[in-house]
Amino acid sequence: MKNNLPNRRTFFKTLAASGLVFSGISGLSCTNDSKQKIKTKHWDVIVVGGGPGGVPAAVAAARNGARVLLVERYGFLGGMATNALVHPYMKYKAGDKIITRGLFEEFLDSLMKNGALTGDRQHFDAEPMKWLLDRFVMESGVDLLLHTHGIGVLKKNQKIKTVRVFHKGGIEDLSADIFIDSTGDGDIAAWGGAKVEIGRKDDNQFQPMTLNFRMANVNIKAMPPGKEINGAYDEAKAKGEVKNPRENVLKFLTVHPDVIHFNTTRVIGKSSLDGWQSTEAEIEGRRQVDDMVRFLKKYIIGFEKSYLMKMGSQIGVRESRRIMGKYVLNADDVLSARHFDDGIACASYPIDIHNPTGTGTDIRFLKKGTYYKIPYRCLVPEGIDNLLVASRCISATHEAHSSLRVMPIVWALGQAAGTAASFCLKKNIKPADVETDELRKKLTEQGAFV
């Protein structure tokens, strides 16, 4: 089929001819040479991205005395948990020891009190989570700006001066002393000129995306064991009834007694950094969900009267950019359960690489009962003096990233980044100059496990 879409150059020429000119964008950086006057507002700390890294980053900074703005592109907070229906909270224990505490544990308590979390504190309800996150940030004194997209930065020397954002009210420049990138994709860091890597080193391929979905009215007591479901899945794939490179059916219980959550679709070869590819990924994800719904109702006992309850509002993204910071966490650090003197978050989740090009998942576990520490240096990008990163895109290799990317760990990273930002303000120092012994002490005092 002939592609009638305009190429990039033609597109921008057309915009220019129509008077709709993207003025001030040079590469990935915005400048302030626009003829249109753009409003500027100032905060101590601006956090971009309201997911599992951005929420605790904003709360931690605010509770430690900073005036904070949290910017989120959707109409609610939660990131992959609420937007993409990513579920449940993956492992945050080493043996019986809980190693992600602090603000994460506080928020789990809030979910539990409101009937939105199971007794094992893993399975949550994303709908009440939305308003509980609103309350969590606003009661901490955080200013919140929803329905707002970051579109670039204004950088002078080695400092970001403003983040340029767009919402239906227009374009604004948001100024701060310290910025925290919690976008997941590392947008602010990349726009600011930080060194980044994309995908795995040899071919830049990402881990695949997954569109999560839920089936309701399931007779869970009648449901067969996983081995039997996987056997039926293989049979349906062999017949061509299911077209999906995923090798197994991954399912979870939920807070609802007749609802099963599925993390089973696999969309390969698409990038979340490109709108066209993301569109293709969303469409393919929904096609795979339709295959799975038909398969479950036809082949699996207990699903005869079930129905598709919900899909993620967007496809789940495992990997995109990773910043290159003061230290790059690697696979050996993870598997050897290495502890760093500047460790600010702990993790025991395995290396978990979903094949970027097809079937198979590479899972490598830590020794039972052990955990590794993530150094503060992984949150500090090279080349930008007033930026911290608090999301899955911190400084790590493709392999190490596959372990640290899960939500509980990112909560811990966010709390550390927000607390470090408050140190920068009080001492008038750069993130790279934060005294990590003092930071670790403060995190411990505020309930974190470091």
Image: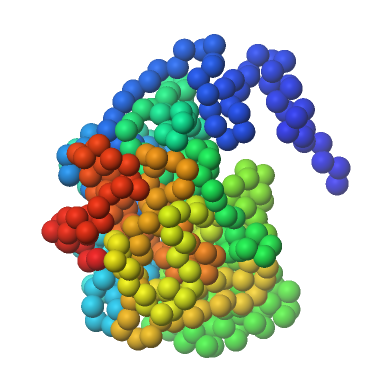
> Viewer-proximal residue, 347 or 50?
347
Residue 155 percent location from the top left of the image: 47, 30
Quadrant containing the C terminus is bottom left
> Viewer-proximal residue, 137 or 396?
396
Residue at image point 56% right, 78% down: 362
Residue at image point 22% right, 55% down: 439
Residue 372 percent location from the top left of the image: 35, 73
Q: Which colour scheme is used?
A: rainbow
Q: In this view, does 304 lie to the left or right of 429?
A: right
In this picture, is 67 found above or below 23?
below
In this picture, is 153 found above or below 346?
above
Residue 214 appears in the picture as rendered: no
Residue 421 percent location from the top left of the image: 28, 44
In this picture, is 17 found above or below 226?
above
Residue 385 appears in the picture as rendered: yes
Q: In this view, does 11 lie to the left or right of 42?
A: right
> Viewer-proximal residue, 14 or 39?
39
Residue at image point 25% right, 37% down: 428
Q: In this view, does 71 lie to the left or right of 84?
A: left
Q: Is residue 249 left or right of residue 447?
A: right
Residue extending farthest left:
445
> Viewer-proximal residue, 206 or 342?
342
Residue at image point 58% right, 35% down: 28
| Residue 103 sits in quarter | bottom left
Residue 113 percent location from the top left of the image: 17, 60
Q: How many marks?
A: 0
